[in-house]
């Protein structure tokens, strides 16, 4: 019987079934972070248990890490207690910590793939909802809660009800200025924040295949915002070339064996999906959120929608978003003043993202009154960007060049906006107060963020491309 990519990975990692019907799925890699690991370590110690596979478990110091130059723990004293608890729990269980001073420090969802820690067909778990990012390599990744985290530490398995299978076929060729982020926002606009609920999403079609690997990770990063359990794109030659030579990737004969296996993983012709939809991306324009959930999206040239025709419950929700964001039905989104710009996070902080933004900023200065911060997703991304001179482009334009961290995505390290500020952000969530109390967040790609920094207003990035004004 033909099987999907998801079925093949699931079947290869299912090690048993519990009496409650949940399947025990073996995890090939497990990465912790400091917001959840301390509690799990404490519970494990109280039960007299050790981490079962410390050799394939890692700790990333990303959420509370400061972005200040030469950052150390003193830069964010509010995070010291939980960071120290993760260090101690990791030391006690012989787990490697990607700490501030580690050359490979960074956001876990950026560090894991760039090291070759996560590979096609592998399973991966992180106590962070955006674990699905690495699905861009054809891996099956799950964000887990603290109880699940303790279970994985003790058993190296995750107990799950098998999700359903969903395929989203992306057709056509996006227009100028459109990035992977715009494709993801377009899908959210189409299916909403619950459209993928109960499913694993597999992306297919020419628009998905045309994305660079970093773009595929951006797309998969946002599947959690679609309500799905995870998202994937099957590995292909572009994937394998991207992985080849990475520090922890297979070498020699093991590489050839791995490659042969990876080529068997794509969904078989005729494989059945529980839900199958198509999204037309042909000529896609840059997208932007206008409201307070990631599915409240319009084209950059669009106007704020009117809730009048909606049923009462949805109308009230939209009216609440309009009030919080300080916009009215019929308003053009382009031209709204912007006070702050953030380029970073596990969504859009890889080298191609920084290069794209730098291409808009080169030779330009940010508008008076705009505060702008760029945070590379890892120390490696930072080194590579500096080797290309991108740090100088950003700083010459007036951006602050930060140390790697989650930063303004969650604000756990102190990087936040001020009440009432309108922020253009390359992150993944625009909820009320997400980037600070009263902060109005618009989700965009790196190019659109850079364009707003230069003009001080929400601006169609295409106007600044190829030598525009």
Image: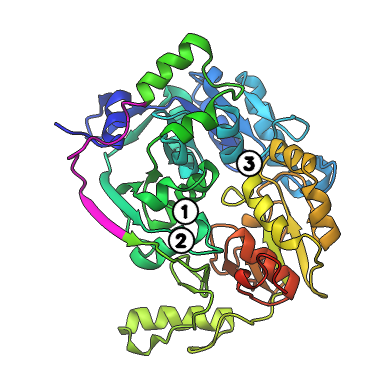
Local SS, label 3:
loop
Q: Nearer the viewer, residue 370 or 211?
A: 211
Give the residue at mark 1. Answer: 222
Left/right placement of residue 72 relative to residue 376 reads right
Give the residue at mark 3. Answer: 107
Report how far apart the C-alphas of labels 3 and 2 lie in the structure.
29 Å
State which quarter of the image contains the C terminus.
bottom right
Q: Position of residue 362 (x, y in %)?
A: 77, 59
Q: Position of residue 456 (x, y in %)?
A: 73, 75
* Location of residue 312 by image quarter: bottom left
SS majority, magenta: loop
Q: Nearer the viewer, residue 242 or 342?
A: 242
Left/right placement of residue 85 relative to residue 208 reads right
Q: Which residues are magenta?
A: 263-278
Residue 24 appears in view: yes
* Location of residue 32 by image quarter: top right
What colour scheme does the image use?
Answer: rainbow
Local SS, label 2:
loop
Which residue is found at the position 54% from the left and 84% from the top?
Answer: 323
Q: Residue 174 has which mark? A: 2
Local SS, label 1:
loop
Q: Position of residue 295 (x, y in %)?
A: 43, 67
Direction left: furthest residue? 1
Q: Earlier in the sequence, mark 2 or mark 1?
A: 2
Q: Residue 47 has which mark? A: none
Report how far apart the C-alphas of labels 2 and 1 lie in the structure.
18 Å
């Amino acid at each position: 019987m033909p099987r999907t990519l998801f079925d093949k990975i699931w079947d290869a990692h299912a090690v048993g079934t519990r009496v409650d019907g949940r399947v025990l799925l073996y995890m090939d890699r497990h990465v912790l972070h400091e917001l959840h690991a301390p509690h799990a370590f404490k519970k494990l110690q109280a039960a007299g248990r050790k981490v079962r596979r410390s050799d394939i478990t890692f700790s990333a110091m990303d959420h509370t890490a400061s972005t200040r130059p030469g950052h150390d723990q003193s830069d964010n004293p509010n995070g010291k207690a939980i960071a120290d608890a993760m260090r101690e729990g990791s030391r006690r269980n012989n787990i490697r910590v990607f700490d501030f001073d580690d050359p490979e420090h960074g956001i876990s969802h950026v560090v894991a793939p760039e090291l070759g820690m996560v590979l096609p067909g592998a399973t991966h778990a992180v106590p962070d909802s955006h674990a699905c990012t690495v699905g861009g390599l054809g891996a099956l990744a799950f964000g887990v809660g603290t109880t699940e985290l303790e279970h994985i530490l003790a058993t190296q398995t995750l107990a799950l009800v098998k999700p359903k299978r969903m395929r989203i076929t992306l057709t056509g060729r996006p227009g100028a200025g459109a990035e992977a982020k715009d494709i993801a926002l377009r899908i959210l606009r189409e299916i909403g924040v619950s459209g993928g609920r109960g499913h694993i999403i597999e992306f297919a079609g020419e628009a998905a295949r045309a994305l660079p690997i970093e773009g595929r990770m951006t797309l998969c990063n946002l599947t959690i915002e679609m309500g799905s359990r995870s998202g994937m794109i099957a590995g292909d030659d572009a994937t394998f070339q991207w992985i080849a030579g990475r520090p922890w990737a297979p070498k020699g004969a093991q590489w050839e064996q791995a490659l042969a296996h990876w080529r068997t993983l794509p969904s078989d012709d005729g494989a059945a999906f529980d839900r199958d939809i198509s999204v037309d991306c042909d000529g896609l324009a840059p997208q932007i959120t206008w409201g307070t959930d990631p599915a409240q999206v319009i084209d950059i040239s669009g106007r704020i929608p009117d809730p009048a025709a909606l049923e009462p419950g949805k109308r009230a929700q939209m009216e609440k978003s309009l009030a919080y964001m300080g916009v009215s039905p019929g308003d053009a989104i382009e031209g709204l003043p912007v006070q702050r710009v953030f380029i970073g996070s596990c969504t859009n902080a890889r080298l191609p993202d920084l290069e794209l933004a730098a291409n808009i900023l080169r030779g330009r200065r940010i508008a008076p009154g705009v505060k702008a911060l760029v945070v590379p997703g890892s120390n490696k991304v930072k080194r590579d960007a500096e080797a290309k001179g991108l740090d100088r482009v950003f700083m010459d334009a007036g951006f602050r060049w930060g140390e790697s961290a989650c930063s303004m995505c969650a604000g756990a390290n102190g990087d936040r906006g001020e009440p009432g500020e309108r922020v253009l952000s390359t992150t993944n969530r625009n909820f009320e107060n997400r980037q600070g109390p009263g902060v109005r967040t618009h989700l965009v790609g790196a190019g659109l963020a850079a364009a707003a920094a230069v003009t001080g207003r929400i601006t169609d990035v295409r106007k600044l491309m190829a030598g525009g004004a």
